[in-house]
Amino acid sequence: MKGRMISLGTAEGEAIVSKEPIGFYGGIDAKTGIVIEKGHELEGKCVKDKILVFPRGKGSTVGSYVIYGLKMNGVAPKAIINKETETIVATGVILAGIPCIDKIDIENIKTGDKLKVEADKGIVEKLK
Amino acid sequence: MYLTREEEFILNGEKGEVYEKVFRLLVRLGDIYGADKMIPVGSVQVAGVSYKSIGDPGRDFLEDFAEKGAKVKVLTFLNPAGMDMENWKELGFPKDFAENQIRIMNAFKKMGIVVTATCTPYLAGNLPRFGEHIAWSESSAVSFSNSVIGARTNREGGPSALAAALCGVTPNYGLHLDENRKPNIVINVGVELKCNSDFGALGYHVGKLVKNKIPYFKGIKDANTDNLKALGAAMAASGAVALYHAENLTPEAKIMETKGLENVDVTSKEIKETYEKLNTGKDADIVILGCPHASLREIATVAEKLRGKKLSKPLWICTSKAMKETATIMGYTDIIEKAGGKIVCDTCMVVSPIEKMGYKTTGVNSGKAANYLPGFCKQKVVFNNIDELIKGVL
C-alpha cells in the first residue's frame, strides 16, 4: 500500500485498528498508553509498541502534546497509519519522531496484522 | 511546496535537530492544506501555555526545546498562563500547580519569547499592521487581528505557532490568501447593542449558527474595540469564526461583495434567548471580568462603579501586566482593591483551575467565558452586564 509520508522513520509491528477517529487529549493516557475515552472502540487497550491505525485525529489541539508524551514515557505506538492525517496528529508525530503515513486504505488492515511501515517511501507492507 | 535553498538546508538538518523538526512540521502542515510556499511572519502569539491544558508532556517538550538552544526569530508573545505569575499565592493558586507553571514560563523565556501572557497582545505591545502576515494562536486574538486590524493569520495550534516563531515563516494558505477572506453569510442585526455582554450574546448566537463561516454584519450602528473584542471572542468560542467583517466598522468590509449571499436576521428575541441559555446559575460566588483580557477603558469603568463600595464576594478583573501597570498609575487598582476586588494578570478564568479553588458559580459579562466555564471549569454561570453583576456581589 502506498500513501504519503507525514513523519519519517521505519517500523515493524502488530496493527491495532480503530474505525473511529482518536482524540488524544483525554482519549489516551500519556503515562500508560491506554485508551481511556469512554465508549471508544479501543477503550482499555494499550497502543504501546503497536502500529496504530485510525482514520484521523479529533478533539483538542493539546492532543499533539499527548502524542509527544506517549513517546517520552516509552509507551508510544511504533508507527501511525491514517486515512487522512490532520494537524493535531501531524504535529504530534513530527514532534515525537513517530513514523507516520496517511492516504492509506485502512479498511484493508485488521487488528493483529503484522505490518512493515517505511514512512520515508510512504509504503505500508503486510508481512506473513 | 516550493522551498528556498536555505529552507532546504534547514529541512536537511543543517541547522540542528530542533529546527529540522519544527520546519518539517511547517512543511507538512503546508502540504496538508495545499500551501505553495512559506511566507515571513511579522509576529507570533503562542498558545498552550497553561499547565492546566498542556500538562507534563507539554512542559517537558518546551523544556527540552529551550535546553537545546531554540530561539525565536520574531516578536513572540504568549497566551494566558494558568495563574497570576506574581500574585499566585495570595490569590490562592495551588503550590504544585504554580511550580509547574513557573517551569513552563522559564522555558518560554529561555527561547526569547516575551512572557507577557495575554489574549490581547495587541493592547500589550504586539500590534500588527493591516495586511501583515502573522501566526497567532488564541482564538479571540486571531479574530481581532484578522477582523478589526486586518492582519492575516490562521488559527495556529501551540506547536505550529512556536515553529513559526523559531523559523520566522508560516505556510501560505487559508486566511493568508485574499480569496479565503471573503464573507459567505450576511447577518442583519436588528437590535441595539448596549454593552459588552450584548455583543457577547450576539457573538455566541452567531458563532453557533455559522460555525466556521465568515460572517458579514450589517446594522451594527457603532462599536468600540472593546465591543468588537467581545463579539469576536464569543463567535470564536461557540463556533470557529476566525474572521468577520462589519459594515462601516472593520477595514476590509467595504471591499467585500455581499450580493447573493445567504441572509440571516438577528433581533432582540434571539439576544434575549441567548441570555437565558447562558445563565445556568443564580447567585455568583465570584465575578470574573476581562475575557478577553480587559482594556484600560474597561478597568476604568469597573473602578468607577466600585469607587467607595464594599464587595461581599470576590471580583477579579483579568488583564495583561501592561494594562495593570497603567491602571495602578491612574489609581484604578487602588479603588478596586479597596472595594475588595482584584486585578489579576497573565491568566483568566478559562485556563486557571478555579474549580479547585472552591468556586461553583461564576458571574461573567463575556459570551466566550459563558461558553467555556461549564465544561472546562465545572462552573455554573451568571451571564449579565457589568452593572447587574456588580449589584449581585455588593
Image (cartoon, grey):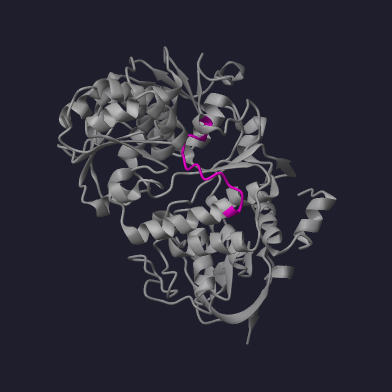
Residue nearest the viewer, comparing B356 with B213: B356
The answer to whether residue B62 is above or below residue A13 is: above
Q: Position of residue B385 (x, y in %)?
A: 26, 25
Dominant SS in magenta: loop
- Asked where in the image residue B179 lies, by quadrant, the reply is top right
Q: Is residue B111 magenta?
A: yes
- Asked where in the image residue A86 lies, by quadrant, the reply is bottom right
Q: Where does the magenta region start and end?
A: B110-122
Residue at 55 percent across and 32 percent down: it is B125
Residue at 75 percent across and 44 percent down: it is B37
Q: Position of residue B28 (x, y in %)?
A: 67, 55
The answer to whether residue B377 is above or below residue B127 is: below
Q: Seen in the image, is B286 located left or right of residue A29?
A: left
Determine the residue located farthest toward the bottom in the rendered image: A128
Residue nearest the viewer, comparing A95 with B257: A95
Is any part of residue B121 visible from this angle?
yes
Residue at 47 percent across and 43 percent down: it is B117
- Asked where in the image residue B100 lies, by quadrant, the reply is bottom left
Q: Seen in the image, is A44 located left or right of residue B152?
A: left
Is any part of residue B243 visible from this angle?
no
Q: Is residue A51 magenta?
A: no
Q: Seen in the image, is A53 located left or right of residue B82?
A: right
